[in-house]
Amino acid sequence: MREAALTATGIVAGYVKGLPILTDVSMTARRGAVTVLIGPNGAGKSTLIKAIAGLVTVTRGKVELGDRDITNPRTDTLQELGIAYVPQSDNIFRTLTIRQNLDLVLRRDKLRAEERRAALFEQFPDLADKEHERAGGLSGGQRQFLAVAMALATDPSTILLDEPSAGLSPRAAGEVLAHVRKLADDGVTILLVEQNVNQALRMADDCFILADGRNQIDGPAADLLNDPVVGEIYLGGKRVRAS
Amino acid sequence: MIQSLLDGVLVGAILSLGAIGLTMAMHILRFANFSHAELLSIGAYAALVFDGLFAALFPLLSEAIGPLSLTWALAAAIIVSMAITAISAILIDRVVFRRVRALGGELSMVFASFGVALVIRNFISLIFGLKTQLYSEDIVFAVILSQDPLLLVKPDQVFALIAALIIMLALHLFLSRTTLGYALRAVAENPTLAEVNGINLKRMIAVVWTIGGGLAAFAGVSYGLTNQISPVIGRDLVLPIFAATIVGGIGSVYGAVLGGFMVGIAANLALVVLPSGYSPAVPFLIIILVLLVRPNGLFGEARA
């Protein structure tokens, strides 16, 4: 059994004071595992990731990284905590070149920057070929790879990914998710929000299903994939009923 | 006509320097700062004070540099005034804009900037009086570049233009070659993503004010050197600087440079066909024409 790397307990959070989107959510992401958050639109999946990243204020509950309480972190200190967050859209700097995007993230470790950049280009050869091109000109899939490369640049222990396959062709989405799986196999803790339930459950280790800002069902992803109730609700297209 | 073009280029360089700082602050802080042009006044007067001080303390510095009216004392004073104006810009942000930002919206910021402009302008009038002043009482004759058509240029104007171009080149290298430059561009494009990537927004805002204040100070001194110094420099230049910013596209440093030259040249060329009283309307016409064709300005992009 892998140890818990990131834990959220009894989270209440929202964008407007007094109107919480998350009313009571708990989840655990294990080290070196892919934990996927699924649920209908408005369930609070992205809000939970943003709350962990400090972009939405947690008014009650606790977020822990290992044994450390990191509730409501300053967003610009996430990298120092070893956390990388990849938003769903606008997750690269379009006006900078690919290399400048990476150098920006690598700026704190100038000594190792060149080595890290070379390693990332080796991992993402498509990006290496376009190193000096503006990132705004990349295809959807290439943008997601650049966003993931930026997240990896600082060697994070945990990556929060908000719908990395959104808007991509099935092939590109498959490639991105396969890469995410590989990162987890290399020891990175992945917390993933995904709309493509079937694909997500096939590549994830653990799954938490949210609805109306609360936990609904959770367990090993493989079990939920074969669960007739989950299959009917999520793979058959019906909405989950709030408890 | 060619003389107007030449004068327009010289005025354009001053407007560009003002517009660069304004476009950066407007893009990153998301508000139209109508007090930005007052930073030119602060720079011009700070240089006047330190020019006098340096000349009194070190009489040798009162020597003019070559054919210019610019003395060594004023050259040193320009550097001090750039630092003072940058610090003033940061202080104004800390004392006024940061507080309004925390409590109000963009519109509150705009109104606050009007208030700041009035306070600065009247404070300068109170201290230095309303009378116009000059850095040097010496008469510097214009150099004849051509007899037919007659083209005249003052050495101080050439100095201001060349120095402005060098500053713009340095800024270009800073933004395109350094990670701090990338960070500034990143914050301008998407502040939330910049924070997620470890960029401290407060520090970047201070950098923007430092650059904006420094450039505004140099623009203010250049204006004073080629025209005269008065407490209404800011009032007179606020609209042309805004026009340059909007024409170039908010957030685009290169657009601000081009916009500054376009507005400067157009305003001077207009004098050939229009009575001088209509000259202040030219920046408005340019804004309207550009926005009709390109609503985001020449180099502006939709913001994240």
Image: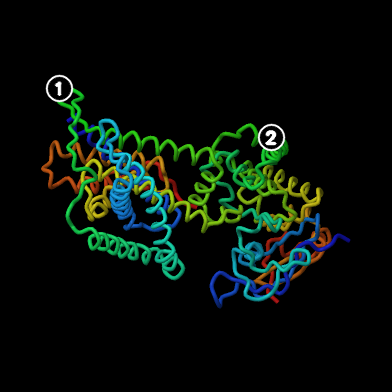
What colour scheme has been applied to the protein in the rendered image?
Answer: rainbow
User: What's the mark number on residue B147?
Assistant: 1
- Residue B254, position as x, y percentages in the image: 40, 40
**Which residue corresponds to the image point at 50% horizontal and 52% vertical from the top-left?**
B304
Nearest the viewer among A218 and A26 is: A26
**Which residue corresponds to the image point at 21% horizontal and 24% vertical from the top-left?**
B145
Residue B242 visible in the displayed image: no
- Residue A40, position as x, y percentages in the image: 65, 64
For badge 2, the amino acid type reads Pro
User: What's the mark number on residue A125?
Assistant: 2
Q: Quadrant of the N terminus of chain B?
A: top left
Q: Is residue B106 above or below residue B254?
A: below
Quarter-of-image position of residue B128 = bottom left
Q: Is residue B286 above or below residue A29?
A: above
Nearest the viewer among A188 and B290 is: A188
Q: Are marks 1 and 2 on the same chain?
A: no
Q: CA distance from mark 1 to mark 2?
A: 62 Å
Quarter-of-image position of residue A201 = bottom right
Give the crowd class for mark 2: few <14, some 14-19, many >=20 residues within 10 Å: few
The mark total stands at 2
